[in-house]
Amino acid sequence: MLSISQICDLFEQGGHQMYSGEPVNQLQHALQSATLAEQAGATPELVCAGLLHDLGHLLNPQGDTPSARGVDDTHQYFAIPYLRGLFSPAVLEPIRLHVDAKRYLCATDASYWGRLSEDSKRSLELQGGVFSAAAAAELIARPYAADAVSLRLWDDQAKVSNMVTPGLPHFVKVMSACSLAPVQDLPQSQ
C-alpha cells in the first residue's frame, strides 16, 4: 500500500511527463480532474478519485502514447492494489471503472464518441470498444458506476493547457480526509 507521501513523490517524479497526446502533463491532468470534481460539488472521495484515476500511468510507465503502439496499459486496474487499504471503495471503484465508463458513454450517448480526443478514441478500441446495450446496462447497475461516469466526464475535460487549479497540497488535504490509514508522513510543504 502506498502512503499519501509516496503518492506525492510519484507526482513529483513522473507528473511532468506529458499525458499521451494531450496538451497537459500527468500532474496537470490529475489536478484538473480533481478540480472539476470539486467544482461540481462531488464528495471528497470522488474528488480524490479524480486526482488518482490515472495513477496507474505513473506506477507502470509505458512511454509516450502507448495506444499508438497498440498497448493498453490497463492503468485503471494497475493502481488499485497500491491504493487498497489507504482508501475506501468510494475512491477505488470509480478509478477501476472509469475506462468502462468511457465504453458505457459511447454506447449510451450518440455524441460522446465525437467529443473524445484522438488518443481516447484509439485507446477505446484497445480497451474493448463500445459496450453493447446489455453490457452498458450491466455496468450502470453496479455500485459506484454513476460516480465513474461523472469521473470519466471530468477526465475528458481535464486536458486544457492553461487551466488554473489548486496545487497538489490542496488535494493532499482531501486525500488525508479520505484516508483509511493513519496519516503520519505528509510532505513537509503540505
Image (cartoon, grey):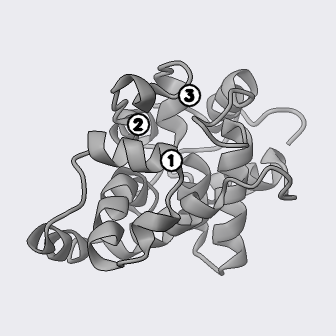
Pick the quarter of the image with the C terminus.
Answer: top right
- Quadrant of the rendered image containing residue 189: top right
Q: Which label lies toward us, 3 or 1?
A: 1
Residue appearing at x 56%, y 47% in the figure: 52
Q: Which residue is mark 2?
A: 75
- Residue 41 picture location, percent across and down: 65, 81
On screen, 10 above or below 133? above
Please indicate, yes or no, whether residue 144 appears anywhere in the rendered image: no
Residue appearing at x 51%, y 31% in the figure: 57
Pick the quarter of the image with the N terminus.
Answer: top left
Q: Which three-letter amino acid code belongs to the residue tagged 3?
A: Leu
- Residue 144 picture location, percent across and down: 34, 70
Say whether marks 3 and 1 touch (CB < 8 Å): no
Q: Is residue 94 left or right of residue 39?
A: left
Q: Which three-letter amino acid code belongs to the residue tagged 2?
A: His
Viewer-proximal residue, 176 or 56? 56
Number of other residues with Cα within 10 Å of mark 2, as a class: few under 14, some 14 to 19, many 20 or more: many
Q: Disc 1 to disc 2, how far (Cα)?
A: 18 Å
Q: Which label's residue is closer to the chain start, 3 or 1?
A: 3
Q: Which residue is mark 1?
A: 118
Viewer-proximal residue, 99 or 112? 112
Number of other residues with Cα within 10 Å of mark 1, as a class: few under 14, some 14 to 19, many 20 or more: some
Q: Is residue 119 left or right of residue 129?
A: right
Q: Is residue 93 left or right of residue 6?
A: left
Residue appearing at x 69%, y 27% in the figure: 17
- Quadrant of the rendered image containing residue 75: top left
Q: Which label lies toward us, 1 or 2?
A: 1
Q: Disc 3 to disc 2, how far (Cα)?
A: 9 Å
Q: Which residue is mark 3?
A: 58
Q: Check disc 1 and report its element: helix, strand or loop.
A: helix
- Residue 23 picture location, percent across and down: 72, 43
Viewer-proximal residue, 71 or 96? 71
